[in-house]
Image (spheres, rainbow, N blue to C red):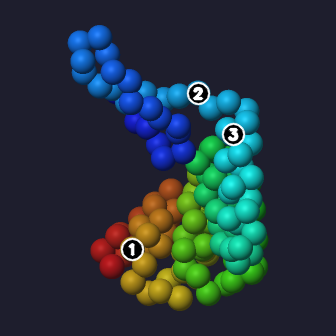
């Protein structure tokens, strides 16, 4: 069965044998527009770095890793004290196969939060992709 994500409009339908099923309901243009307006209103109350992160998350979810990387970079320019922004940008850079840049981001995240598991795993993955087995093992064992 297909997963239903929180962004989908769903309804419960009663079948002829009196069993119920959840199904996706196609969004009309007006429903989609209303949803986008609500999101913009919500984002207008958020700090600029959180808005950029949210847009980066949306771009990443769409598979637009280049745009996600740009939005996470914007979030970092607004607030460079969040290890999450560096970890998110690192994952985008990994998807773009920019491994040395991903290592730099993970190192920045670890300077802020030395116990960041995501930063260690992503840096280890990047080291592995670059052929630095010893560095990868060290990150994975930390």
**C-alpha distance separating marks 2 and 1:** 39 Å
Query: Is residue 73 positioned above or below 36 on the image?
Result: below
Q: Residues within 10 Å of mark 3 (few under 14, many from 20)?
A: few
User: Could you tell me which quadrant the N terminus lies in?
Assistant: top left
Mark 3 element type: helix
The residue nearer to you, when weighing 15 against 116, is: 15
Q: From the top left corner, tell me how far across and down residue 118 is, in percent.
A: 44, 70
Q: Are marks 2 and 1 in contact (CB under 8 Å)?
A: no
Q: Which residue is mark 3?
A: 32
Q: Tell me how far mark 3 sits from mark 1, CA to CA.
A: 37 Å
From the viewer's perspective, is 77 left or right of 104?
Answer: right
Mark 2 crowdedness (10 Å alpha carbons): few <14, some 14-19, many ≥20: few
Q: Secondary structure at mark 1?
A: helix
- Give the mark nearer the N terminus: 3 vs 2: 2
Q: Image quarter for residue 20?
A: top left
Q: Is residue 109 left or right of residue 121?
A: right
Taking depth in this image into account, of 86 and 16 the one nearest to the observer is 16
Whether residue 120 is visible here, answered yes or no, is yes
Q: Which residue is mark 2?
A: 26
Foreground disc of the pair 2, 1: 2
Is 133 located above or below residue 60 in the figure? below
Q: Which residue is mark 1?
A: 117
């Amino acid at each position: 069965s297909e997963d239903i994500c929180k962004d989908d409009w769903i309804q419960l339908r009663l079948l002829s044998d009196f069993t119920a099923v959840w199904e996706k309901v196609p969004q009309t243009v007006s429903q989609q527009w209303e949803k986008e307006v609500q999101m913009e209103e919500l984002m207008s109350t958020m700090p600029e770095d959180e808005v950029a992160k949210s847009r980066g998350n949306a771009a990443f979810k769409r598979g637009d890793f280049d745009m996600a990387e740009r939005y996470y970079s914007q979030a970092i320019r607004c607030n460079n004290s969040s290890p999450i922004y560096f970890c998110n940008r690192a994952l985008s850079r990994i998807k773009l196969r920019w491994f040395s840049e991903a290592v730099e981001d993970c190192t920045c995240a670890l300077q802020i939060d030395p116990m960041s598991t995501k930063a260690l795993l992503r840096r280890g993955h990047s080291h592995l992709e670059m052929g630095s087995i010893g560095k990868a093992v060290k990150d994975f064992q930390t």
